[in-house]
Amino acid sequence: LNQKIEMLKQGKVSLMKKQREAAAKHRDSTDAKSREIMTLKKKERKDGQKMSRLESEVQKHKNNLQKRADFCDKLSTKLKQTEVHLMKVLSQRKHDLRKRTQQTQRQKHQRSEQKSEGKLTNVGFAPDSEEISSLNFLLEKLILDRASLSLLNVKYEEKVAEYSDLMRSMVKEVK
């Protein structure tokens, strides 16, 4: 009987030891799972912050691109207006030149008649320096506008490429 009691006591002790070990094992696994959950939550929070930061950066780039596109549109519109104006001025100048050429030919004809008659008078005309300088200014302005438009187009294309690369990298990071 004592031997049986001793055996039951040892069985009880070993059973309690097994229960303690199981409880410790369960506590350790629960703690590990809790740490894993906390790590995942922290990572998720960091990813969310990074995503919002990238989204704000993308929005900033979009706004910048939109401003540049608007500026390019305004500049090209102004360039077209300048070209139209220059074409009008040029056609007017051609018309004036034809008139002056005709007048000059008439004057030459009159001079030759006056020479033959012996009544030569000194007839001349002043150069149109103001018109030439305004035409020169308009042409220089057209050239500068075209050059700046070309530079802006190059910058715009670079920004679009940068935006595309940024979006691709964001998609890769999100995946």
Image: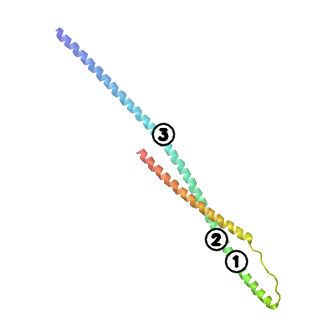
Front-most of residues 101 and 171: 101
Mark with earlier residue (2, 1): 2
Mark with earlier residue (3, 2): 3
User: Residue 32 at what x, y percent from top left?
Assistant: 36, 29
Q: Residue 87 carries which label?
A: 2
Q: Which mark is residue 49?
A: 3
**What residue occupies the far bottom of the structure in this picture?**
116
Relative to 117, say whether 5 is above or below.
above
Secondary structure, mark 3, is: helix
135 relative to 151 in the view: left or right: right
Q: How far apart are marks 2 and 1 (CA)?
A: 15 Å
In the rendered structure, are the residues bearing label 3 and label 2 in contact, judged by CB atoms less than 8 Å apart? no
Image quadrant holding the N terminus, namely: top left
Kindly report which numbered mark, 3 or 1, lies closer to the viewer in this rendering: 1
Q: What residue type is labelled 2?
A: Met
**What residue occupies the far top of the structure in this picture?**
2
Q: Which colour scheme is used?
A: rainbow
Q: Which residue is drawn at 66% across and 71% down?
A: 88
Instruction: Return the residue at label 1.
Output: 97
Front-most of residues 152 and 53: 152
